[in-house]
Image: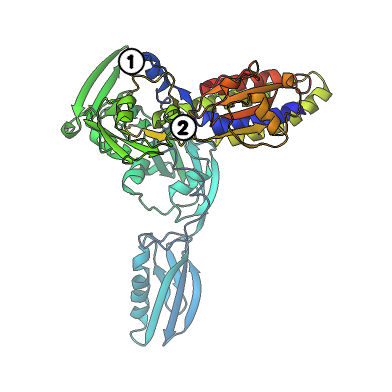
Amino acid sequence: MKFAFYFIFAVAIIVSKVATAAVILSQDTNDQKTLLAQPLKGDGIYGSWLFQGNFSNASFSGFNPNYHIAIGDKVLVQLWGGINFQGELIVDAHGNIFIPKVGPVLVNSVKNSELNNVVKKSVTRIYKSNVEVYANLSTSQKVKIFVAGTVKEPGLYEGQSADSILRFIDQAGGIRSDIGGYRNILLKRNNELLKQFDLYDFLTTGELPVIPLQEGDVIFVGAKNGEVNIQGDVGFEGKFEVNKPNTLLTDILTAVAIKENATHVTIVNSKGTEGDAKQYLINDLVDANVTPGSLIKVSSQIRAKSISVEVIGEHNSQQEFVLPWGSTLSELIEQVEFTTLSNKKAIQLYRPSVALRQKAMLLESLNSLEQNVLTTRSQTTEAATLRSTEAETILMWIEKAKKVEPKGQVLLAHLNKTNPIYLQQGDKVVIPSQRNLVMVHGEVLFPTAIAYQESLSPTDFIEQAGGAMADFDEMNILIMKPNGSVITANKDLRNKKIITAGDEIFVLAKPDEKSFQLTKDITEVMYRIAASAAVFLAI
């Protein structure tokens, strides 16, 4: 099972040390923009997080003071003094509870907060004095409600009459994201409209009318009437449902939470094959309207005059530099006061936007590998058994790799003033210390750190780590430099010049194509994983 070890070890190295660390930044401006492009925007629906099973997990017990008593509810009544009584009474079909020696008391539609007063007034009509009354809603009636329309699982669901419509919709699997609407939900009783709900009111202001439900009520979730797309400097990016031909832009922006740095809003109204684009200042949106199908882009169009860059590691300068907008890495380095231990040749740059792009590329490659593992067919029963074992191991490591968060390192290849790297807000520059060690990892007898000597070649360092576990012809020897770049040393194992202090040597087994049927597929995807981190592996 040689390839199993190779795959596990190689993925661990690529993911934890390379994919999390390195992207070669081309000095060409257009290539720079391509590498630093942000991941594609999501197409989620505003409110899609509402129905995740949290409402269906618990039923409402009816203690809401604004709840209105309904037929079938149970009321706990206690009388003491001139008359003694304690019992749980059911609200009958006429809306009454019957108290012995008092008679029927009408409580239907009475607010829960007023229940005790209503019962007490009825009792004191019969007993003028020396009688104390306590009445409280014990539990609301169990009812079965039909949930229909654009929910995932229409059907008949049970709950309490005091439960909100949210619980029943959640029981039905929530609202369909493709055609379902959050703003056109109807409560019907005896085929007549009782109440219309807009769940965006609940999401934005917390408003949700409390209406006692009755056996056989119908909750109907209507289809969406239209939607707009939101992008840019907002808390939520995606689709936002609109229920009118014209919707105030301010209402939408309030819901999606525009960011503090936003200055402009662009509306691209969809009109057949033509678009009508208008731009507004954030402070001039009083009467701006949007129509279904529009694109809303919120942006900050105030260019910063300066940026802050964190500089950590081996130096005697301040930890944070404030630089004019458009400053380059070379200009920053000129201001840094190095020490005798500073490794100027191994300066590292980490950038948040690169980390986002690395994550997107890594997930794309891993998803492709996962698809190949799950869909590759076997011609024999023996091959299918072997493939099942392979797939279990590979899928386990794919899940582990998906959890890795890239660091966003930019490899500083050919850094000079003629090919400047312009700094961005949030960049972090690391100045490592000089290291007089060489690390040896992988298929060696004793993975360890060895003191650097100019007279030693890659082969010599590997031998000092106990030697490789197989012939060098069956190995891939990779050398990672202190700045994160990786070179292949298969043909230069005796070359003393390719090893410098601070290097790391990886001794990897070449895949045995006879041992694993998925080798070719995995090798291709591993090439893509490596390429997504701009590290080129000769497998």
Residue 159 lies, in percent from the top left, at: 52, 53
Mark seen at residue 284 = none
Helix or strand or loop: what does disc 2 sit on? loop
Q: Quadrant of the N terminus?
A: top right
Q: Estimate how packed mark 2 is, as few (under 14), some (14 to 19) or many (20 or more) residues with alpha carbons within 10 Å.
A: some
Residue 121 visible to the viewer: yes
Residue 207 drawn above or below residue 74? above
Q: Which residue is mark 1?
A: 418
Indicate the quadrant where residue 266 lies: top left
* Residue drawn 73% across the image and 30% down it: 467
Task: Give the image quarter of residue 338.
Answer: top left
Determine which residue is flagged by label 2: 177
**Splitting the image into 4 quarters, where does residue 227 fall?**
top left
Foreground pick, 90 / 233: 233
Task: Give me the residue at 54% from left, 20% from top.
Answer: 531
Mark 2–mark 1 Cα distance, whole angstroms, equals: 51 Å
From the viewer's perspective, tell me whether residue 319 is left or right of residue 465: left
Which residue is at 34% across, 34% downward? Answer: 426
Name the amino acid, label 2.
Ser
Q: Nearer the viewer, residue 184 or 337?
A: 337
Which badge, 2 or 1, comes first in the chain's sequence? Answer: 2
Q: Amino acid at mark 1?
A: Thr
Front position among marks 2 and 1: 1
